[in-house]
Structure formats: structure tokens, C-alpha cells
Image (cartoon, helix red, strand yellow):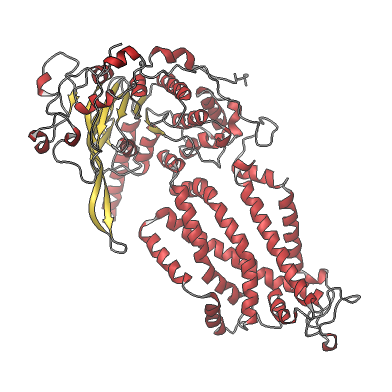
Amino acid sequence: MPEMPEHHDEGSAIASTGAGGATDLAMSEAETLEKVPGGPDGTGPDKKARSLWSDAWHDLRRNPVFIISGLIILFLVVIAIWPQLIASGNPLDCDLSKAQEGSQPGHPFGFNGQGCDVYTRTVYGARASIQVGVLATLGVTLLGSVLGGLAGFYGGAWDGFLSRITDIFFAIPVVLGGLVLLSVVSNNSVWPVIGFMVLLGWPQISRIARGSVITAKQNDYVQAARALGASNSRMLLRHITPNAVAPVIVVATIALGTYISLEATLSFLGVGLKPPTVSWGIDISSASQYIRNAPHMLLWPAGALAVTVLAFIMLGDAVRDALDPKLR
Amino acid sequence: MADLSKNDEAVAAANEEALVAAIDAPVERGEPILQVRGLKKHFPLTQGILFKKQVGAVKAVDGVSFDLYQGETLGIVGESGCGKSTVAKLLMNLERATAGEVFYKGQDITKLSGRALKAVRRNIQMVFQDPYTSLNPRMTVGDIIGEPFDIHPEVAPKGDRRRKVQELLDVVGLNPEYINRYPHQFSGGQRQRIGIARGLALNPEIIICDEPVSALDVSVQAQVINLMEKLQDEFNLSYLFIAHDLSIVRHISDRVGVMYLGKMAEIGTDSEIYEHPTHPYTQALLSAVPVPDPEARAHRERIILTGDVPSPANPPSGCSFRTRCWKAQEKCAQEVPLLAVPSVFKGQDTPAAHFSACHFAEEKQVVPAH
């Protein structure tokens, strides 16, 4: 490719001929275009065409926040699937004589009120807690952003109908709704709890998705795409979604922690997960009464919960930043 | 029955085929390429939360007619809210017209859909006002300018697109190596060049420019305007150039239309409008143009209009300008003046004999001769 000149001021020759004398168009005509800063990675032009997604991935791979949070999440997922990898004991193997005892050789986290090993229970508790947190967040985000996004994009009667439905769901108190709905379910697995959270959680994401889609839709670039003859699906996927996804990511990652602790609340009330299921929520709520005598019982599962939530929030943050070219 | 409906489908497909062929046919220079007839857009005003009831309409565009000839630039001027941008959106089919027709090469395009509409969109493109919102911040320049090729794959084969995008960048005066950059890495003028490159990608015949330079600095305005003039010659484009800056419109336009409150007040060639305006609104507008020469400035008359622009939801009867016009009489409140050569100038060979929607049209020198 031939070398291109940096500046193009073809205007200077033509401008003064027909400016009409009314405004001095020719003034400072020779002003050159300023040089734009280097490419996204600072290495200057390269030969390969890039897109938002490839640039985002290029960024993420070099972002320590993404690497750390990704490793934590990977670790959590691995121990949720194979807890026996790092915990040899049985979480239901308890000895009442050791109730509330502190750290001992072989039992680094001590024992809980029933004399069960806190370390083993914390490791085994990851499965139920992460299942509830991740699946409820995924369900809420998918359902909420699809319904809210379509309502925002198409507007009209569907939007009005959906907005009234979300109003109704917002009026249902979470704990009372949980007591009523979950007490009639006898299935002792995580699925009723996840289903309940999706049912009550989607209106929040739906509102946010609807709002950000309406904001994005009003931009001229969406009109420009329509003027080019773009289909609705192209406008939604290429123009609106990338520009509306950031608030949804932020709220969804924060909500993940809320769902894990909501599971604990529901378990405490006796309608969430029931023993012998092991979960951080159950352990946190049962330990909270002994916080003064045996704080270790609360701190270990609560710490695990905090690290999990933090890892997901950091991941969401890193992804959101990577999708915003202005931050590069 | 089944045969019949199949037949109908075949007829519809053949009609669409013929329509697309007509849309793709070339037009001689100087022939009308776009004919707008009685175009109207009324936005409904509704009341009530659950049961919406229409209580009125904002008459944003209320019966506009004009022709755009192949290869020319038609400027549309008027103050904010007079319906200029709505006309642009109607021509682009971004809004559906309430009434009236837009004939592109003899085909009414206001009711098209599907393949025929896509063919029209390939030939009529738009440059937007605000270069900061008209480019998707999350797409690279290459993706933005290449998007027209994704939507109309027949224009450029897949392997050829990157080269085409780089050619377009070069045509609008940007470095072709900027292909992987994002819009925020460019200045306002450069962004507007990217917007122009996107408009040019499909090799259209008409470009509708909705205030393409009003968001730019004066010096950059000149660069962009000159670029647009250069491209017009190079690609044989017809421009509909909407602006509120009278000097820029004069600089670029062959003909000029003046809009007021959703209607066309006066339309004619560049010199007819600027040197021989006959409509009082045009005269008032022109008298507000800054004059750089202090001597000439001292001698000219400023026409100061009183009052505000009436609400387009409730326009005055008769002539819409009569509430602010110093010449208004009883007749103006009763009869809507037609956009035609005024009867006083009919048959005369004078530059004042052009279309003007005024009952009492007369010439008045407002811009000092130069």
C-alpha cells in the first residue's frame, strides 16, 4: 500500500472561492487534522482487521484482575464438582463432644455447633451455594434482559404489559413470598430455590435492561443502521446490545452475592435448602447465634462467600471495562 | 384456490422485480431524481395512561413539495423546529409519512417494504448531524464503514471489503491504516468524515445531509463542506442539504428552499433566493445574516420579527407566517397561499419570478450586493 499523507487539507484551495462573503469560511482553513493517538495496543497499525470482541479478549488476557478472578472462579467450580480433592473428611460425620472447638491439627477451621468439621463443610458447601448463586443469576439475567430488552426495543403494548407485570412482582416481599411459595414444595434440592429466585429476581434486571436499551436505541447510529437497511436482529445484536450490556453486567454480578445470602435466609427460615444438604447459607445462619463464643464457625463460610462474590464482581467489572473501547 | 394464491405471489414477486429494476435504473443529469409531493407528517398527541386518546397532532411537516434534480444540491433552510429534520427522516423512510408521496425515479417509496425498500436504501443515504452519536462507540472504523457491505453483500464480495473500506477512508481524507481504531480516537471533523464514508459505501445516488456541519468548528466546517463538494463531482451525487446556517447553504447549494412551520415558504435558485427574495420570511431570515463589511452593514436594514413561532400543534389559519408578518392582512388569515410563482411576477423574465408562498410577494433587497 502506498504511503498515505498524514494531513489532508484539500479545503484550503477551494474554500475562498465561494464562501459567499457572509462568514469567513476560509479563516484558519489550513488548520490540519490533529494526529490521533496510537492504536489500541500502542503498537501502531497492524494488518489484521479487529472487532470489539477480539479487542476485548485481547485486553482481558492481559488484565490481572480478570486473571485473578478467573482463577478463583475456576478453583471454586472445581471444588464444587470434586470437593473430595481438597477435603478428605465427610461433612456429615460429626462428633458432638467437639462442638464449637477451635482449630486443631487436622481440623484447621475448628468445629461447629454440632461438632462437624468446619473446613470440610465449607468445602462441601461450595457446591450448593455456587449452584444457587450462579444458576439463579444466569436465569434472572437471561430472562430479565431478554424480556426487558425486547420491551425497550419494540415499545408499545408489549412494553406497557411487561412494565405492569414487573410492578406486580416488585410488590411481592421476598421473604414472605419465599415462605409461601417454597413451603408448599417438598422437593429437597436446589431447584425450587433457584426457580423462586428467578421468578422474583427477573423484574429488577428487566427494568435495567429496558432502560439501557431505550437509551441506546435513541442514538443516531441506530438510525444510521436502519437507514442502511439493517434488520431488527442486526440492530439489536450489533448496535444495541453492546451498548446496553454494561449496567446489566454490574447489577447481575452484585446480585449473585445477594442470591447466595438469600439462600441462607431462606434456609434459616426453614424453606430453603434443608439438611443434610450442606451449604454456606445454612452454616452461616446456624453459626450466627454463636458469634461471640465461636466466631470461627461464622468467619470461614462467610469468608468463602465473600471471596466468591468478590471474584464474580471483579470478573464482571473486567468484562465491562474490556467492552468499553474508551477505557483503552 | 391454492393455484390462485400461488399466482398472486408470482405476480407480487414480478412486481417487486420490476420495482427493483426501476429503482436501479440510471437517471440523466438534470432530470428530477426525487419528487416530493404534499408530504405530511403529523405526530399524534395522546392523553391518558391506559386508554390513550388522541387529542391533537403536531404538524411537523404539513404539505411539502419539491423536486431534487440529478447532480444538484438542494439546500433546505429554516429555524429550529420548522420540520427540516423530519423531512430528512421521511425521505429516508425512518418515519412513515402521514400523507403525500415521495417519488424516487417515478416510484413512490413511502409505502415500500422488503426488497424494494432495501434497494432504495442502497441508493439514498444519509449523513447525520452529530458525529458524536452517529458512530457506534463500540465498533471499529472498519466495522462502521464495512457495515453497509454486510447488509448489502451484493455490493462487495467478502474478500474485497477490507480494501474497499480502506479506499473509502482514503477518499474522505483519512489514513487507511486507521481501520482498527474506535470513533473516540478521532476529532469531530474526522468523525464526520467517517460518517460520510459510511454514506458513500453503497455508491448511492442521493445523500441527505441533515445539518452535517452544525456540530463542527467553523474551520472544520469548511473542510467538510469542501470534501462534500469534491465527492459530489467525483461520484455524481445529488445532495439534499439541510442546515440552518444560511451562508453554508448558499456556499454549497444550487437551489434553496426555505421552510417555516412545516411548510415550504419559498424555493428557487441560489441567486433568486439570496438576491431576490420575495417572501417576507426569507427576507427577515436573510437580514439576520452577519455581514463582514462594516460599511455595508451600516446601510442595510434589519427586519426584526416579533413574537414566537406558533406551536405546530395549533398552527394559524391561512398563511402560517401571518402572525409574525408585517404585511399580514385579512386575506392571509383566510386563504392558504400556494407555493407558486406570485401573480405579480407571472410571465415576467425576472429572477423574482420563482416559487413563493405569499399573497403579497414583492422583492426587497436585504443582502448587500457583492
In the rendered image, which quarter is residue A304 located in? bottom right
Q: Residue furthest front?
A: B298
Seen at 28% across and 40% down, the residue is: B110
| Picture coordinates of residue B229, whole percent (x, y) | 41, 20
**Viewer-side residue, B79 vs A279:** B79
Q: Residue furthest bottom?
A: A97
Seen at 40% across and 21% down, the residue is: B232
In the rendered image, which quarter is residue B336 located in? top left
Determine whether A191 is above or below B177 in the image: below
| Picture coordinates of residue B339, whole percent (x, y) | 17, 29
**Viewer-side residue, B11 vs B47:** B47
Number of callouts in the render?
Answer: 0
In the picture provided, is B251 more to the left or to the right than A208?
left
Seen at 48% across and 24% down, the residue is: B220
In the picture provided, is A211 more to the left or to the right than A58?
left
Give the position of the N terminus of chain A as an image quadrant.
top right
| Picture coordinates of residue A167, whole percent (x, y) | 43, 68
Determine whether A129 is above or below A176 in the image: above
Give the position of the C terminus of chain A as an image quadrant.
top right
In the rendered image, which quarter is residue B37 located in? top left
**Viewer-side residue, B167 vs B13:** B167
Seen at 61% across and 45% down, the residue is: A53
Determine whether A213 is above or below A162 in the image: above
In the picture provided, is A145 more to the left or to the right than A1?
left
In the picture provided, is A36 more to the left or to the right than B308?
right
Q: Residue furthest right?
A: A105
Q: Is residue A295 visible?
A: yes
Q: Is residue A132 visible?
A: no
